[in-house]
Image (spheres, rainbow, N blue to C red):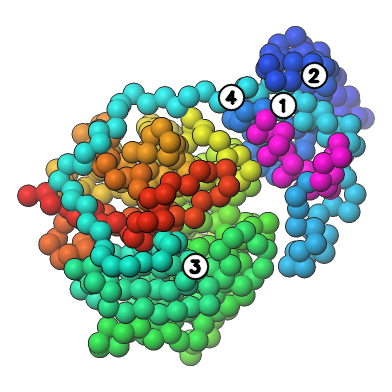
Amino acid sequence: MNKWRALCLGLLSIAVWECSACRHEKKNNIFPDVADSSIVRGRTLSKIYCQSCHLLPDPSLADAKTWVNGILPLMGPRLGIFRHNNINYHSYIYDRNLPRGFYPRKPVLSSNDWQRIIDYYSAVSPDILPAQKRDQRIEKELPFFKLVKPQGNFSVPATTFVKIDSVNHKSAIIIADGVQKNLTIYNSRLEKTDSLHFEGPIVDLIHKQDSGWLACDIGVFNPNNGKFGKLISLSIKDSGKMISNNPIWDSLERPVYVMEADLNQDGKKDYLVCEYGNLLGALSWLQNMGNGRFERHVLKAEPGAIRTVINDYNHDGLPDIWCLFAQGDERIILFTNRGSGKFEQDLLLRFPPIYGSSYFELDDFNKDGFPDILYTCGDNADGSGVLKPYHGLYIFLNDGKNHFTQKYFFAADGCYKAIAKDFDGDGELDIASIAFFSDFKNQPEESFVLLMGQGNLRFKPYSFPEAGQGRWLTMDVGDANGDGKPDILLGNYSIAPGFIKEHPDWKLQPPFFLLKNIHP
């Protein structure tokens, strides 16, 4: 009896809310004729169907045309809707890599109800998104950094990974090309010393504890649902030459990031893998069973895992895992290590699915001993290729109990990565950031921004005149010339999607730029 009474009261409250909301919805100029009743009902339906998978996106996060032509047609197939109003929606329904039953066999809602959701998002969203707001002008000259480019003839740059390495090679620079599928080493004079070819693009590379490297081969760079990725062990000869060994694991779903750690405390190094995937994916770890054998365990069977950080936040001696999921349900999850390979999940931060989360790291910005979160969003390859005022880098401060509050935001269109480092040695963290989907036409300088820390979460932004000559997908910070100062390495991926007008300089420039730190 109580159950039915609660249900009736719930339905009554929805009805009352719908009647009251009908008087408050403000329509845009693009879809002014949408019925108020359809808008209100569509809002209720969006809470039921959209919020079931991710944070409910507010219509204000995209313009009306982007909702209608880009975002909602991508959502439709997940609800079993592949055609609406004589328009075919893009889907992977014939992809044999997807498991049977991935898509609903029948629509989970009627065509009329789907239209009401469309009406809601199309009619109350803005005609165009508001302009980006930034309190400070970006200075177009970098302090104490000198731009250095490699010399020689290069193919069209398609750099998928960059690394400044000073472990196996003294001050070496490592570059991966996603089209040529090569991994190339340069010395401190930016001279090519070795190159090795792979079956797929290399997107990450780490040092193994025993020796050599572990390369992360994504398999196929563009979105797909196949298990084509692999982890490949590399040996390094005394001469510095690379030798590729057999993969330690294959059949991974678009792996993009790998870490080495003894996750189960058995004395053997395991591997933590972000399998970004597309519609499929996972955060997984490969348990080292000894004698070159591994066993795969899935921590979370969802796509979008893009970066992890290992940090023992509770000081119990066990490595805890912080992970950013950057697709669909965008969020940062803490996997607390309970020992013996068992982990407990806690949601730390959650973002709307349209944000385009791209990177995070842990830094202590307020020097209280607790890890804060530096986060970027700006991935626009999601059916919503418009400039968004909320793209940029964020700082979330930790209250000491892993409750995070946003305390800083720097607007940067298409922001893709940010690395905090004290570049000038003044004791304050600075931030180097890149933007892969920036406002190349009007603000090419935001493609790279150096935020110089001035204390108390105050920063002054700088760039350099040539920032817009490359399209920066990757970045690394390290000592590239052995002088003890942190330099900045930028990787140029010149190939742009159709909604971006390519700049002629991108393909004419080398695969990487080095910003050499010349601070006295």
**Magenta stretch, residue numbers:** 65-88
Pointer 1 and pointer 2: residues touching (CB < 8 Å)? yes
Label 2: which residue? 34
Residue shown at 81%/54% (left/top)? 103
Residue at 55% in and 39% down: 355
Q: Which amino acid does label 3 sit on?
A: Val
Q: Name the residue under label 1.
A: 122
- Using a 10 Å C-alpha cutoff, classify the residue at mark 3 as few (fewer than 14 neighbours), some (14 to 19) or many (20 or more): some
Q: What residue type is labelled 2?
A: Val
- Choose the circle earlier in sequence order: 2 or 3: 2
Mark nearest the camera among 3 and 4 is 3
> Is 434 rendered above or below residue 439?
below
Distance CA(mark 3)–CA(mark 4):
36 Å
Q: Which of marks 2 and 3 is in front?
A: 3
For the stretch drawn in magenta, what is the main secondary structure? helix
Name the element at disc 2.
loop
* Disc 1 residue type (three-letter): Ser
The label on residue 128 is 4
| Residue 105 vertical placement versus 21 (above, below) | below
Report which residue position mark 3 lands on.
Answer: 179
